[in-house]
């Protein structure tokens, strides 16, 4: 008797990026910075430096989505990132001056987990 298992780790669910406002971006950066989950360490103006990643798996979906006025597109992105244990990424399009939120390809790993993995000889990505 044999059992066949198929793993599809590289396949991404098609979640469209969500558009967020500058006010929502500032609120999210403050929320993430207070909790130590902002992955950039600069203190630049958030509207100038709006290409960054943040960890979202540690927080409830409701607490994050409240920052974005419960926008359906944002909920879909955050939910997918949490389900796949990935970070989210904010990017600004200079041509349209819009700010987008999407699922990043970076694993959602805290600094403590990263240090522990390095201590065990596990390569971190």
Image (tube, rainbow, N blue to C red):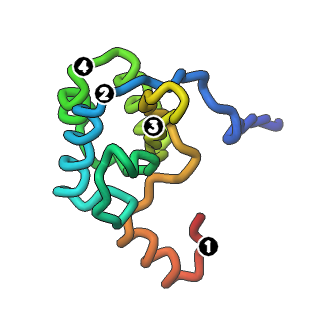
Classify 10 Å Cα crowding around label 3: few (below 14), some (14-19), many (20 and above).
Answer: many
Q: Tag 4, which secondary structure?
A: loop
Q: Residue at x 43, y 24 (%)?
A: 18
Q: In the rendered structure, find residue 123 and report the number of the disc placed on it.
A: 1
Front tag of 3 and 2:
2
Distance between the Cα atoms at labels 2 and 1?
A: 36 Å
Q: Compare marks 3 and 4 and give the one earlier in the sequence.
A: 4
Q: Compare marks 3 and 1 and give the one earlier in the sequence.
A: 3
When the figure is inspected, residue 124 is found, relative to residue 74, above or below; the finding is below
Please provide percent x and percent y for residue 10.
70, 40
Mark 4 = which residue?
A: 70
Classify 10 Å Cα crowding around label 2: few (below 14), some (14-19), many (20 and above).
Answer: few
Front tag of 2 and 1:
2
Q: Residue at x 42, y 32 (%)?
A: 99
Distance between the Cα atoms at labels 1 and 4?
A: 37 Å
Q: Tag 1, which secondary structure?
A: loop
Distance between the Cα atoms at labels 4 and 2?
A: 13 Å
Mark 3 = which residue?
A: 81
Q: Tag 3, which secondary structure?
A: helix
Tags 1 and 4 in contact by the CB under 8 Å rule? no
Mark 2 = which residue?
A: 21
Please provide percent x and percent y for residue 112.
36, 72
């Amino acid at each position: 008797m044999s059992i066949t298992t198929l793993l599809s780790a590289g396949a991404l669910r098609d979640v469209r990026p969500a558009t967020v406002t500058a006010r929502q971006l500032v609120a999210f950066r403050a929320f993430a910075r207070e909790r130590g989950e902002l992955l950039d360490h600069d203190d630049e103006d958030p509207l100038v430096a709006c290409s960054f990643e943040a960890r979202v798996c540690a927080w409830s979906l409701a607490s994050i989505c409240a920052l974005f006025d419960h926008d359906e597109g944002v909920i879909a992105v955050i939910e997918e990132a949490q389900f796949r244990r990935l970070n989210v990424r904010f990017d600004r399009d200079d041509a349209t001056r819009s700010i987008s939120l999407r699922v990043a390809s970076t694993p959602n790993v805290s600094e403590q987990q990263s240090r522990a993995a390095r201590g065990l000889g596990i390569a971190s990505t």
